[in-house]
Image (tube, rainbow, N blue to C red):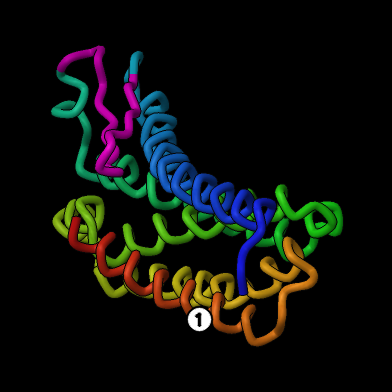
């Protein structure tokens, strides 16, 4: 099926929103760390995201802030990032499923879908295998608990990924069932690849 100009524009818009939402999710993760840092006495936290989708949060003042944290406070600071982005993802997931207003506007639906996808992806994989995961284990938290939380989020994310077909049909009502199924299957393959890459970068 030959794509028209409008369909091509929709595809480019979807790809752009999806890529941007990856960085937004990473920034939300770091904002979670920054909020906790302020609570524990950091006056100038600096959350940031670099081009390789890695995020960092450090304290500019006071200089000895990290070394002054107790082991329990360090655990809470570390946990706050994946927890904040995960809870945001769950809230967006509920909005995607329940809001009729979002469902009536395909552009808004795609924005919420991509943000939900990447919020949940960031949170789930951070609980399963990441720098934060390693710090939490070293601080004495049983990794079984982290895996349970990560697996639960991955289950919700998998369900969300399967619903990609509904989103396609919302954006393009004339899309044939066979084509929608094929695009959904390709998206699920992409989802698996993203998970694998995310775990090893």
Q: In this view, does 169 lie to the left or right of 112?
A: right
Which part of the image, by quadrant, shows the C terminus? bottom left
* Residue that extends furthest to the front in the rendered view of this protein: 2
Is there any visible trace of residue 13 in the rendered image? yes
The secondary element bearing badge 1 is classed as helix
- The mark tally for this picture is 1
**Position above or below: 148 against 96:** below
Residue at 57 percent across and 77 percent down: it is 162
Q: Is residue 59 magenta?
A: yes
Residue at 47 percent across and 68 percent down: it is 153
* Residue that extends furthest to the bottom in the rendered view of this protein: 178
The residue singled out by tag 1 in the image is: 185
Residues packed near mark 1 inside 10 Å, few (<14), some (14 to 19) or many (20 plus):
some
Which part of the image, by quadrant, shows the N terminus? bottom right
**Position above or below: 108 against 36:** below
- Stretch of the chain drawn in magenta: 45-63
Is there any visible trace of residue 91 in the rendered image? no
């Amino acid at each position: 099926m030959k794509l028209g100009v409008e369909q091509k524009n929709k595809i480019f818009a979807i790809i752009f929103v999806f890529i941007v939402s990856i960085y937004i999710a990473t920034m939300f993760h770091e904002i979670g760390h920054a909020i906790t840092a302020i609570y524990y006495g950091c006056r100038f936290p600096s959350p940031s995201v670099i081009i390789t989708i890695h995020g960092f949060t450090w304290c500019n003042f006071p200089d000895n802030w990290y070394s002054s944290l107790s082991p329990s406070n360090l655990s809470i600071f570390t946990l706050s990032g994946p927890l904040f982005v995960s809870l945001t993802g769950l809230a967006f997931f509920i909005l995607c499923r329940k809001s009729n207003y979002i469902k009536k506007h395909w552009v808004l639906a795609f924005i919420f879908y991509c943000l939900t996808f990447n919020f949940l992806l960031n949170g789930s994989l951070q609980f399963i295998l990441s720098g934060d995961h390693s710090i939490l284990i070293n601080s004495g938290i049983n990794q079984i608990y982290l895996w349970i939380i990560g697996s639960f989020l991955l289950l919700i994310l998998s369900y969300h990924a399967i619903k990609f077909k509904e989103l396609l049909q919302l954006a393009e009502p004339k899309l044939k069932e066979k084509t929608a199924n094929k695009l959904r299957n390709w998206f699920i393959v992409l989802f698996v690849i993203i998970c694998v890459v995310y775990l090893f970068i």
